[in-house]
Amino acid sequence: MDYGKILNPAVRDMEASGIRKYFDIAATMDDVISLSVGEPNFVTPEVIRRAGIESLKIGKTKYTSNRGLEQLREEIASYVKRRYKVSYDAESEILVTVGGSEGIDMAIRSLVGPGDEVIIPQPSYVCYEPITIFSGGVPVIIETRAENEFKITAEELKAAITPRTKMLVLPYPCNPTGAIMERADLEAVAEVLRGTDIIVLSDEIYGELTYDGLKHVSIAELEGMKERTILINGFSKTFAMTGWRMGYACAPKEIIAQMTKIHQYAIMSAPTVSQYAAVVAMRECDKQVDEMVKSYDERRKLTVKLLNEIGLECNMPKGAFYAFPSIKSTGLTSDEFCEQALIEKHVAVIPGSSFGKGGEGFIRFCYCYDIEHITEGIKRLKSFVEGL
């Protein structure tokens, strides 16, 4: 059979994630120091694990409502109101998803059709552009710049908008750059959007991971923006619950209703045990989250200090748990740098180009590992850079 003719061209012609290449190489090697995976090295807090175990013991193993457990949706509504001063109706404006990634997928597919344009700041998380293309949409890329701390500006947004613009993706705090959008930045963006029919997909999965006294601001908080915002968040990064696969979407009921249709046909419902655990996470784990953020902050400062000391210029990230140092001084492309560092020194980092063309000349360095792991990784990078 000629599978080239049978496969969906949109999928067939899509490049595989550049991140996977380095996982595959590293898997064949011993003694690899990986600084590539955006996964907290903390174990899920014990009280959350106990809640999951207890739900299994008492037989809570059946499907839940498509939209998620009522008590979890109510807890999400309470959490979002407490954190961002935005009120959502638990019955009609909140959907529990299988990780934040499912929420992103459903949000784009619910709104974007053939020819619709989606404005995507890059470097950013790898899924926004492919999902837009799979939906028949047209990605409109804004390449953010290091000198502007990788923030999207109102001027850049205004220049990218056309009559076909359907959605703006706001990926802040940002993977891979660690950039955040402060209130004044968001107000400028909101001013451009007010009075349009453009929907904001606000991916806030790293919203609790901000530093230097800066608190995350959701664009949904701003006047007139809740009605045009799909807020995506989850439990993986904040509560160290990556394997539990739990996320949620908050949006106007008209949008949530359409997202729920896709969820019904594709997923049915999020994992039941994870939902019961997630209730406890939101209700009882503020202290544990604060402790994890404090630890990330220490690692952040050490990482940036050491990277600059070995000649890889790096701005101080203000959110998430990634540093995004420049490797332009080495004369290598991002891909060359990462492949050679992995093969020669057994240290794995991710090329910035995996997150969009604007990431060329940079690498993504995760500091969600322990201090000894980070220190050894940078020691190996120093040896690699000195040997060039």
Image (tube, rainbow, N blue to C red):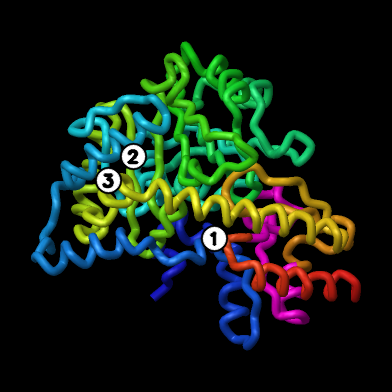
Q: Nearer the viewer, residue 265 or 330?
A: 330
Q: Secondary structure at mark 1?
A: loop
Q: The magenta stretch spans which residues? A: 338-366
- The residue singled out by tag 3 in the image is 96
Mark 3 crowd level (few <14, some 14–19, many ≥20, 10 Å Cα): many
Quadrant of the rendered structure where residue 214 is?
Answer: top right
- The residue singled out by tag 2 in the image is 249
Quadrant of the rendered structure where residue 37 is?
Answer: bottom right
Amino acid tagged 2: Ala
Choose the circle earlier in sequence order: 1 or 3: 1
Please give the name of the residue rendered at 43% of the width and 26% of the height, measured from the top-left corner.
220
Please give the name of the residue rendered at 63% of the width and 60% of the height, measured from the top-left corner.
367
Choose the circle earlier in sequence order: 2 or 1: 1
- The residue singled out by tag 1 in the image is 38
Please give the name of the residue rendered at 24% of the width and 53% of the height, measured from the top-left corner.
275
Where is 256 relative to 21, above or below? above
Q: Secondary structure at mark 2?
A: strand
| Mark-to-mark CA distance, 1 and 3 | 22 Å
Q: Secondary structure at mark 3?
A: strand
Quadrant of the rendered structure where residue 211 is?
Answer: top right
